[in-house]
Amino acid sequence: MTEPQPLTEHTADVIVVGAGPAGSTTAYYLAKAGLDVLLLEKTAFPREKVCGDGLTPRATKQLVAMGIDISEEAGWLRNKGLRIIAGGVRLQLDWPDLASFPDYGLVRKRDDFDEQLARQAQKAGARLYERCNVGAPIVDDRTGRITGVHAKLGDAESGEKREVTFHAPLVVAADGNSSRLSLAMGLHRREDRPMGVAVRTYFTSPRHDDDYLESWLELWDRRGPGEDRLLPGYGWVFGMGDGTSNVGLGVLNTSASFKELDWREVLKAWCASMPEDWGYTPENMTMPIRGAALPMAFNRQPHYTKGLLLVGDAGGLVNPFNGEGIAYAMESGQIAADVIVQAHARATPAQREMALQRYPRVLKDTYGGYYTLGRAFVKLIGNPKIMKIATERGLTHPLLMKFTLKMLANLTDPTGGDAMDRIINGLSKVAPKA
């Protein structure tokens, strides 16, 4: 396939705003299909991003599909499964053996991870602009459709910024949880959807080469006065393989304690309760504690309107069961790209619009029922009593925990599969696709 020739430097078939996993994956598949793509990233790589850095087999599958070298020689650390700790029980669960997904996950720091995806999109033909801060959308007064964006482009050497405009008939918002572009187009966050917060830091630690992701399902606030409190969330410990551990916690907004607590302080207290020889002490901390929001279960809709498509965190695609965002960012990017490629090939504006309207429907068919189950799950575990019973009783049944792992990580074979797969798939099918 001959490489597409840009119409002008600032004009393209599609503009993608944000070069995180969602944006870079979208740009990669669009460019691979021969479309001219502008990928606009507000910072310069490598850049920080708050994340657990642990990837499930679902995300691993996406990396394989994009042709990323995920070998250990290329700096990836593989993990075999999930170790769950709660109620005095430690349970080690291997990732399930499935036809649809690999049986291993990966770990990689986000500054490096995101850059690899962006460079892969560039290799496929996407035009990447770093230090490009996108502001207001350009909207056609007659139709109300987005036709481009205003941006400030920074110079790498001088640091000076110049104002530019980029034009395209379609724009993809991959600009994260706050998604200024979506807000400017009138798409606000839905308050009836769960929201999470993740806070994390890094420690030098002898546990850095653990080949299981570790999840602590009981998150206690032991800072008193009064009795210890069980909080609605979970802690994690992910070995990075580079001498450090990523230690953090994910908390849901479904409890009364969500707004009143300083989660950085909760993380510090939680780390202080760990065995001393693990090294999770202030003097071993290699980075400050940082936090980020986790927008869950389609918390911004519609996912397509007036020439704008939402992918990843901008569309609230984080899994409410486990807080995983990268897999869904990449999957939604691939789905969006496929829809855009098909629309681009249609002859008339009406036909193109009909093809684009399919995008929100595909997302709902793919995730809607599962996310509805996740929202119910989030409400349940927002109650500390239910959480306590679930951890104390559930963890003593390995078969039940295997089912729970598949459910939480959304790892089932869609066709065939075992009885557990069929139950989970069946529940997702009958749940309302809201």
Image: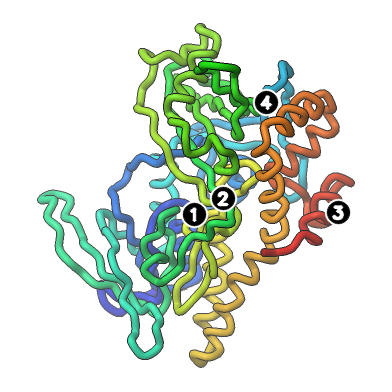
Secondary structure of the residue carrying tag 2 is loop
Circle nearer the N terminus (3, 1): 1
Q: Residue at x 71, y 49 (%)?
A: 376
Circles 3, 4 touching at the beta carbon (< 8 Å): no
Foreground tag (4 vs 1): 1
Circle nearer the N terminus (3, 4): 4
- Left-right relation of 315 to 218: left
Circle nearer the N terminus (3, 2): 2
Q: Work out whether 270 lies above or below 129.
A: above
Residue denoted by label 2: 318
Instruction: Measure how far apart labels 2 and 1 are at the Cα level.
Output: 7 Å
- Left-right relation of 114 to 150: right
Residue denoted by label 1: 313
Q: Residue 278 location, x and y as percent?
A: 51, 12
Circles 2, 1 touching at the beta carbon (< 8 Å): yes
Foreground tag (3 vs 4): 4
Give 35 or 402, whichever is nearer the viewer.
Answer: 402
Q: Residue 367 location, x and y as percent?
A: 67, 59
Say what amino acid the circle numbered 1 marks.
Asp
Circles 4, 2 touching at the beta carbon (< 8 Å): no
Residue 260, visible in the rendered structure: yes
Say what amino acid the circle numbered 3 marks.
Gly
Which residue is outermost to the front? Answer: 226
Foreground tag (4 vs 2): 2
Question: What colour scheme has been applied to the protein in the rendered image?
Answer: rainbow
Residue denoted by label 3: 416
Q: Which residue is drawn at 28% across and 72% down?
A: 166
Residue denoted by label 4: 83
Secondary structure of the residue carrying tag 3 is loop
